[in-house]
Image (cartoon, rainbow, N blue to C red):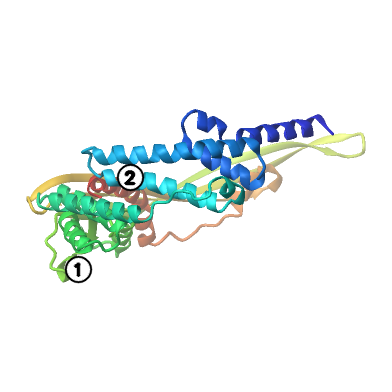
Amino acid sequence: MTTRNLLYILLTLFIFSCSSGKKALQRGDYYEAITKAVERLKSTPSNEKALKVLREGYPTAIQWSQEEIDQALTTKEAFKWEHTIFIMNKVNRMSELIRSTPAARNIIKDPKSYTSELNLAHEKAAEDRYQAGLHFLEEDSRESARTAFNHFNKADYWIPGYKDSNDKMAIAKEMATVNVVVEAITVRTKRYQLSSEFFYNQVFEYLNNQFPTSGFVNFFSPQQAENFQLNPDFIVRMEFYDFSVGNLVRNEKEESLAKRVRVPVTDTTFVTKTYRAKLKTYTDEVISGGRLNYRITDFQADKLLRDNLIPGSFTWVNQYAIFAGDAEALSDAQFALTQQKAMPLPPHQDLFIEFTRPIYKQLSDELYSFFRRYR
């Protein structure tokens, strides 16, 4: 046996020796102590340490749990029944673990379980949340309506369909939700045939992904707002202006090249040969750019909240070259340029899309930052 294998076995034995739950019992973590002890008995039913922890620790764990429940219910803290449910569920999990482990069941014949008590606790917890929801709903504000929604939702969690909690949730959500209309002003230009619809759709899709309808911010197109006869809380307006697309700049560079190379004549003799060429390099650049103005208006208060300009630019580059003379005079990079050809300029719409990419990134970040406070 190697030293490495021996260390592994000793480490495994040490870990198993510590997993009986004894240390957890000593520090008063009764639930962890019983859980570890029973898990240990699953693999080693005769483990004395685990049997002792279970025998001594289980009655104390049940006593401690009942004291916790009694103490919780005597306080005036809100939602005290939820803490009671938490304790009861821990006891029930211990019970299930013991009943599914024969060695543990031999020690604890009739493990404690909360059944009717747990059902009652669920009803009490649901009622507490329901009453809290009613209280906040009566305050008739967006923030209180959001709090009310969360309370009704919790009531429905403890008892699905509790009273009319689903109806109350719908009312609270409608009161809490911020409705935003996102408008895009059509690109107006006589020089180019351009469409900003792709940009608008991209922004609209982003906002709906970041703020799903399950939250408290809903985004609508102008058409949707008209169909729903919506009275929005905010209006977001976007407009491209002061832009130019497809401005070609062509640069030419001519240079003379010479490269001296040692060429073998025989196995032992060399001569120096000079290769010469003239290289003409062309660089075509199409520079496009513009700015987006977006405004956020509080529709109800008729107040402009944000009025920002976001610039964007994109440069399309195509480089190619021609040469006369010896190809050996060219470097690999220069020769590669001679294999390139002049390319037709990209369509204006493609260039428009490219220069809006950085604008989209900044706009989406800023819109998310603004509306996340309402989500």
* Number of numbered discs visible in the structure rendering: 2
Q: Which residue has dot 1 on it?
A: 223
Sequence order check, earlier mark of 2 and 1: 2
Image x and y of residue 90, in percent: 43, 46
Image x and y of residue 18, in percent: 61, 33
Q: Looking at the image, can residue 211 be seen? A: no
Image x and y of residue 103, in percent: 61, 48
Q: Which residue has dot 2 on it?
A: 84
Q: Quadrant of the N terminus?
A: top right
Q: Looking at this view, is 363 or 253 the one in front?
A: 363
Residue occupying the point 63% across, 39% down = 257
Q: Looking at the image, can residue 93 be seen? A: yes
Residue 359's place in the image compared with 25, above or below, is: below
Residue 218's place in the image compared with 279, above or below, is: below
- SS at mark 2 in the image: helix
Three-letter residue code for mark 1: Gln
Residue positioned most to the left: 301
Q: Residues within 10 Å of mark 1 (few under 14, many from 20)?
A: few
Does residue 255 appear left or right of residue 172 in this picture?
Answer: right
